[in-house]
Image (cartoon, rainbow, N blue to C red):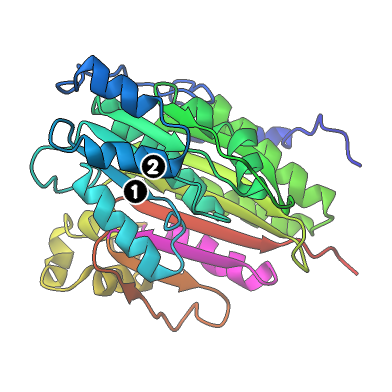
Amino acid sequence: MRSQHHTVHPARQKTILQSFPSRVARRGTILNELPPTLHLPSVSDLDHILASQNATQLRARLKAARDRVSSTFIRLDGLAVEPTGTHSAMLQYLRRAGCGDDLPGTPPQVVALDWSCADRCSAEGLAFFGVLGCLIQTRGQILIVCSPSASDLAGIVMEAGLQETCTHARWIASQASGRRMTRIASPSLVFDSPIAGHEVLAFFTAIEAVLERNKLPPDSVDLTTSLLMELLQNISTHAVGACASVVAVVHSRRRPAVLEIGLADSGKGMPSTVLTSPRLQWLVPLCDASILEAFVANGFTSRPLEAGGGALREVVLKFLDMVPGGVILIRSGSALIRLDLSLARSLRPTQLSYGFGTQLRVEIPLVPLD
C-alpha cells in the first residue's frame, strides 16, 4: 500500500497555492461568526425536544409542541441529486426551512434533519449537507440531526468530519447496522468562498493519492486536478460570500471501484449568474434547465469565447474524452445536467420543481492500466 505521505508535484502545488490565495480555512469549522439567534422556545419545551432519543420520538415531540415551537422535520434521503423526484422534494422542504434563495416568511426556530431514513448518499449530497449546516447555524436556528442508521453512511459521516461542521447542532445517535461499502478519500472541507489555499492543497493531495494508488494514467490525474481547479475557481468567482463544501469518497465494492468527488455551494447558481450578462438577457424567459443547457453549450462561460471564455469547457471535454467512464453531474438552481462521453455534445438537462445553490459530482472509475 502506498505511503500516506503523498505530496502534490511541486509545480502543481505552486499553481494551486497561487490560484487560491485566500485565507486558510479549518476543517470542520465555519468561518463566519454566528449572528444573534432567533427568538428561542421556552427552556422546558426545548429541553423536552432535545432529549429525544430517536427520529420517531423527535418528530412526535416537535408535532406536539407545534403551537409553541415553530419547527420543520426534513428527511435527508434526497441529498443526492438522483433520484430527481426525492431530491426536488427535499429542496422544497429546505426552502420552507429558510435555506432557499427566496425565503417564504419567517423561518422556523428548530430545524430537524433526519439521516436515519437514508441508506446511502453520494459525494455531492455529503458536500451539500455541509452547506446546509452552515446556512442553518449562521441564521441562528436550532439544528437537530438524526444520525444515519446504515453503518456505511454512519461511518462516512463520522470519517468525513461532517459532525464537526455542525458544532452547534444536537446529534441524536441511531443504532447502526449493515456493512461498510464506502470509504473516505478526502474529509469534508466547509468554507466561505473564496477558497483557502492550504486547505485546498490538502484536498488535491488526497485526490491524487487515490488516483495514483489505483495506477491511473498520469494524464488522467492531471486532467482531474485541472477540472477540480476550474470548478473551485468558478465557486470562488461566482459564489463570493457563499458557504461551500467539498468531499470525496471511494465506492470500493463497485466493479470497478469509483471515486466520487462532490462540491456544493449556497450561491445564486449558474442559471442566475448567467442572466447577469447583458449579452445573454434573451435567456431571461427560459427555465433554469434551458439556461443551464445554453450555458454549458457556450463553454461554461457568459463571456464570448473569443474574449477568453471557455477554459472550463476545454477541461471538461478533455476529461470526458481521456478519463474512461468519467461522468460529471451538475445541479444548479432547479436544473440538472449529466455530462459523459456519449452526451458531451448532446445535452439533456432535467428541470426540477425547485432548487437553490449548486451541487456537482465528478465520477472516476478506478480502472488501472492493463
Q: Position of residue 352 (x, y in %)?
A: 29, 69
Counting the numbered discs, the total is 2
Task: Give the answer, above or below, for where 325 lies relative to 152.
Answer: below
Could you tell me which quadrant the N terminus lies in?
Answer: top right
- CA gap between label 2 and label 1 equals 5 Å
Tell me the quarter of the picture where residue 174 sits. Answer: top right
- Residue at image coords 57%, 31%: 161
Q: Which residues are magenta?
A: 309-333
The residue lying toward the viewer, choosing from 208 and 302, is: 208
Q: Can the viewer see residue 14 in this picture?
A: no
Q: Position of residue 110 (x, y in %)?
A: 26, 33
Instruction: Say the numbered circle drawn on residue 74.
Output: 1
Amino acid type of disc 2?
Leu
Task: Give the answer, above or below, for where 256 lies relative to 191.
Answer: below
In the shown orientation, is residue 338 left or right of residue 292? right
Residues at marks 2 and 1 touching, judged by CB atoms closer than 8 Å: yes
- Residue at image coords 66%, 61%: 364
The stretch drawn in magenta includes residue 123:
no
Q: Position of residue 218 (x, y in %)?
A: 77, 55
Tell me the quarter of the picture where residue 90 sits. Answer: bottom left
Farthest residue in the left direction? 105
Q: Which residue position is annotated with label 2?
A: 113
